[in-house]
Image: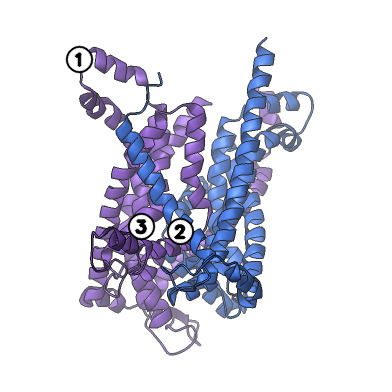
Amino acid sequence: MNERAPTMLLTVLGIGVALLYIPMIVMIGYSFNSSPLVGIWGGFSTHWYLELTRNDQLIAAAWLSLRIGFVAATVAMILGTLAAIALVRFRNFRGRFTLTAMVNAPLVMPEIITGITQLLLLISMLNLFGWPHRGFLTIVLAHVAFCTAYVTVTVQSRLASADRSLEEAAMDLGSGPVRAFVDTTLPIIAPALASGWLLSFTLSLDDLVISSFVSGPGASTLPMVIFSKVKLGVAPDINALATLIIATVGVGVLIAGVVMRRADRQRLRDLQLAAQ
Amino acid sequence: MDRTFLQQKQLGRHRRWLIIAPPLLFLLVFFLIPFGFALTISFAQTAIRVPPYTDVLSIDAHHRLHLAATLDNYRYLLTDQVYVLSYLYSLKTAFFSTLICLAIGYPMAYAISRTSRSTQSILLLIIILPFWTSFLLRVYALEGIIRDNGLLNQALLWLGLIHQPLKIMHTSTAVYLGIIYSYLPFMVLPLFATLEKLDRTLLEASADLGSPPWRAFLDVTLPLSMPGVIAGSMLVFIPAIGEFVIPTLLGGADNLMIGRVLWDEFFGNRDWPVASAVAVVFLVLLVGPIAIYQHYRSKELEGQEGHA
């Protein structure tokens, strides 16, 4: 049954969506404002975008964040997938409870607590072993820890619903367990791996609090630079940067949406063909 | 299917550890053990050295273990009002923001669940999209709306509804707006997930039996959507209570939330033992909400596995 939603519900939905989008749309508008003052329209200008290309500090921070995000997301994807396999496929093993807790807790742990505890660990390690010095590596390690949790949760639900009969068939035909898994189940859960990677990459790029704790002098990520600029007040070039980020994400999500829709339709068609 | 044959084909007990060990060890070292360090250091004293605290456990020249633990940091938390007040303020802010998110998010999720499948996926995309952009930049974007010469004040002045700009920035209102704006999608998504699965024939049955729509909502829809209400509420409440960015950028000097106090204690005062004690107490107080959330999640996962 699909009765039409009452007008009141749709109104609230409209207001909610407007609430989510108006600030971003206004920010995009301001990014083309030639006046540096908020609230005064000085005419259309791409001045702040040009300014952005000249801001070496911002570009260096963006490059650092992209590298950290790439490495952290990739490591987290591997570790998270292994954790998901362990939790879904192996019923009983020592540490199962601990692993379950450790992949669920970061999702709800306030960042500030994770950040502080990780810093205390890193300081103690540095004291004991003289390693690691705070910077790129320590930020990556901290990000991997919370990103792994997100990947595990994403892959876990996909793996739990994946049909095992293909894998069993492959084993009947003589494949070893690893080979059978890679040939049959891995392609099925690959979309979950991809979205886990993307989610990790985004979370890593966006993280301010944890990075601030575990980074060292000279390693300022993009959110750290943005935060220090924004805290001081109006930063018109940040509007331009935000617009670029929103545009990239928008295009990316749009493409992902179209691709997913196509895949869904294809699957539906295949199912119909198979049923005939 | 010959079960024992498949059993033999499965990974041996020892080789399974090749899969289990890497994530388990990594998370032990970089997620769980750090809490042990925080707990230990919360019993230490501040010291002018690097790192800025005394050793709780030490071994002297005669290989004897010394324990120098103090409860001073915890006592200090109770004597200095800042900590108790900021915790209560965080609790209050997170609680009311969650309620407001629920009040806005529930009808939104309900409306989405009533649309056709293809509209649903588009609307969900619209709700999730902001989440993929930067959180920090969205808080900054909100500042552009609510600052003294921001769009909201300009619009209200232009309409003649007010004659002086409203003071929203650096007040509690700004903190509330920031939290609601940032975390609303977290409320809508789990609510939608439960409302979408809701069996509509139950509503028809209750209508057939003479219930008016509002009665059917209270008797059927609301109780059945409770898992979504709880999950969504926890997903807003828990990050909101530890929020740092929003009170720092939008709030005023008196909107002290626990996240900000922790940050200042660490970077401003460099009092790591006290900061550790604050973190430990904060975590203990959060165990309740986190346990509720985990309980709900594990039930949901079981449901999924039973489904497969």
Chain seen in blue: A
Q: Which mark is residue A74?
A: none
Local crowd size for mark 1, using a 10 Å CA cut-off: few (<14), some (14–19), many (≥20): few
Q: Chain for mark 2?
A: A
**Residue at the image position 53 percent from the left and 44 percent from the top:** A153
**Residue at the image position 27 percent from the left and 59 percent from the top:** B93
Q: Is residue B135 visible?
A: yes
Considering the numbered disc 3 on the image, is that residue within a helix, a strand or a loop? helix
Toward the right, the furthest residue is: A174
- The residue beneath circle 1 is B210
Location of residue A13 in the rendering, given as x and y in whole percent from the top left corner: 37, 40
Q: How far is disc 3 from disc 1 in space, using C-alphas?
A: 41 Å
**Residue at the image position 74 percent from the left and 27 percent from the top:** A171
Quadrant where the C terminus of chain A is found in the figure: top right
Q: Which mark is residue A26?
A: 2
Q: Nearer the viewer, residue A16 or B149?
A: B149
Chain seen in purple: B
Q: Chain for mark 3?
A: B
**Residue at the image position 65 percent from the left and 71 percent from the top:** A53
